[in-house]
Amino acid sequence: MKISLLLPVYNEFLTLPLVLQRVLEAPLPDGCEKEVIVVDDGSTDGTTEVLRKYAGSAILVHHSVVNFGKGAALRIGIGSGPAPASATMRPQKNWSPKKGTTIVGSPAQLIM
């Protein structure tokens, strides 16, 4: 099962590289694969440039030219064709897969 991880970001220049590394390295249950969708919601601090380094990687990136807000960023991410199961998270440098919560339920298993 494919799981989409939606990350709406705004001015996360300093924390984003570490968060993305941790998200990409986070384990999933057997039989699951992840799709990481980052929506840059009009950042002005260099976040856009950081995300350009991930072009061609396993991370799908959408750039908005202005800040529309978290709700709009989530709708854009969901509209990007997420998998049957999806989770959203706020990028924080202290996030770790060890701090994550595993939710097991029917019909999907999610890691958040």
Image (cartoon, rainbow, N blue to C red):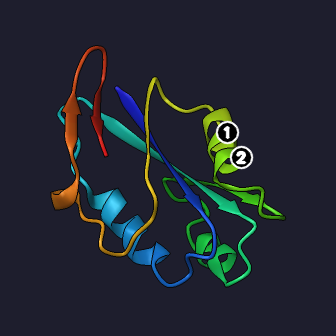
Q: Residues within 10 Å of mark 1 (few under 14, many from 20)?
A: few
Q: Residue furthest right?
A: 65
Closer-to-camera residue (57/51): 51
Q: Position of residue 59 (x, y in %)?
A: 52, 55
Residue type, mark 1 in image:
Arg
Q: Residues within 10 Å of mark 2 (few under 14, many from 20)?
A: some
Quadrant in the picture for residue 30: top left
Residue type, mark 2 in image:
Ala
Q: Report whether 92 appears left or right of 51.
A: left
The correct choice, above or below, for 31 with respect to 51 in the image is: above
Which residue is rendered at x = 42% and y = 66% of the image?
Answer: 20
CA gap, disc 2 to disc 1? 5 Å
Q: Which mark is residue 75?
A: 1
Q: Report whether 69 appears left or right of 97.
A: right
Q: Element at badge 1?
A: helix
The correct choice, above or below, for 96 with respect to 2 in the image is: below
Closer-to-camera residue (35/7): 7
Q: Which mark is residue 56?
A: none
Which residue is rendered at x = 48% and y = 73% of the image?
Answer: 16
Q: Quadrant of the N terminus?
A: top left
The correct choice, above or below, for 52 with respect to 72 in the image is: below
Quadrant in the picture for residue 45: bottom right
The reply to whether the C-beta atoms of the residues labelled 2 and 1 are less than 8 Å apart is: yes
Which residue is rendered at x = 24% and y = 64% of the image?
Answer: 96
Q: Element at badge 2?
A: helix
Q: Report whether 12 appears left or right of 72.
A: left
Q: Which mark is residue 72?
A: 2
Q: Position of residue 2 (x, y in %)?
A: 39, 31
